[in-house]
Image (tube, rainbow, N blue to C red):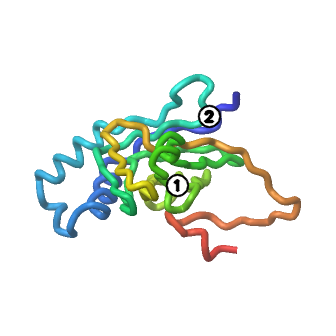
Amino acid sequence: MNKVARFEKVSIEQFTKDWLDTFHEADSSKDSNILAEIKRIYDNIKLPKRATKGSAGYDFYSPIDFTLKPGETIKLPTGIRTFIEEGWALTCYPRSGLGFKYRLQLNNTVGIVDSDYYDSDNEGHIFCKMTNDSNEGKTVSIEEGMGFMQGIFLQYGLVYDDDTDAIRNGGFGSTTNQG
């Protein structure tokens, strides 16, 4: 098997910035209770891992408890980034059981993490935006430390006349205007 990547946590500074931006008011960075809770969450983040030696997907574990009623969405900073060898990408999906039972879906259908995202201005922090798309009225509850998303590394090819030489300088959507 090819070993093509390495998972890491983003820095506590990046995680705090992104967590505050996602879940708190602008002036929350001065609240010591909120900062202590963010530090606790950060310290408990587990790196993605395969459940069995035959698993293709690396399970991402939720940093917090959350519940989604049908139609509700959460944007979740995972605290994770990944170094990926050139020629490979990380594709992200909801855990298949959650998709099957609750129609839990990623808002971008499949997340694609490029190898150069690691060096982006947000340290390559992987976010997950999920929606409970249940048409059966089912509420999904995810506990802290529970697998909620899976990532699979896939190799990709280039066309013969590819001449792209642009360098990433940002996070989400930063490559949209290139080329």
Image coords of residue 10 (percent x, y): 40, 47
Nearer to me, 85 or 80: 80
Q: Looking at the picture, which amino acid does disc 1 mark?
A: Asp
In the picture as drawn, the residue positioned furthest to the top comes out as: 53
Q: Which mark is residue 56?
A: 2
Q: Position of residue 23 (x, y in %)?
A: 27, 61
For residue 85, what is the image quadrant?
top right
Q: Is residue 174 left or right of residue 179?
A: left
Per the image, label 2 sits on a secondary structure element best described as: loop
The residue beneath circle 1 is 119
Q: Secondary structure at mark 1?
A: helix
Residue in the foreground of this view, choosing between 150 and 2: 150
Up the image or down, 57 lies above or below 99; here it is above
Give me the disc on residue 141. Answer: none
Q: Point out the tag, 1 or 2, that comes first from the N-terminus.
A: 2
Give the image location of residue 139, x and y in percent.
35, 51
Q: Amino acid at mark 2?
A: Ala
Return the residue found at the far left: 32
Position of the N terminus, as image quadrant, is top right
Residue found farthest to the bottom: 177
Report the front residue among 105 and 23. Answer: 105
In whole angstroms, how far apart are the C-alphas of marks 1 and 2?
Answer: 25 Å
For discs 1 and 2, the disc positioned in front in the rendered view: 2
Which x, y percent locates residue 14?
A: 35, 54
Is residue 83 in sight in this rendering? yes
Residue at 54 percent across and 66 percent down: it is 169
Left or right? Give the position of 125 relative to 31.
right
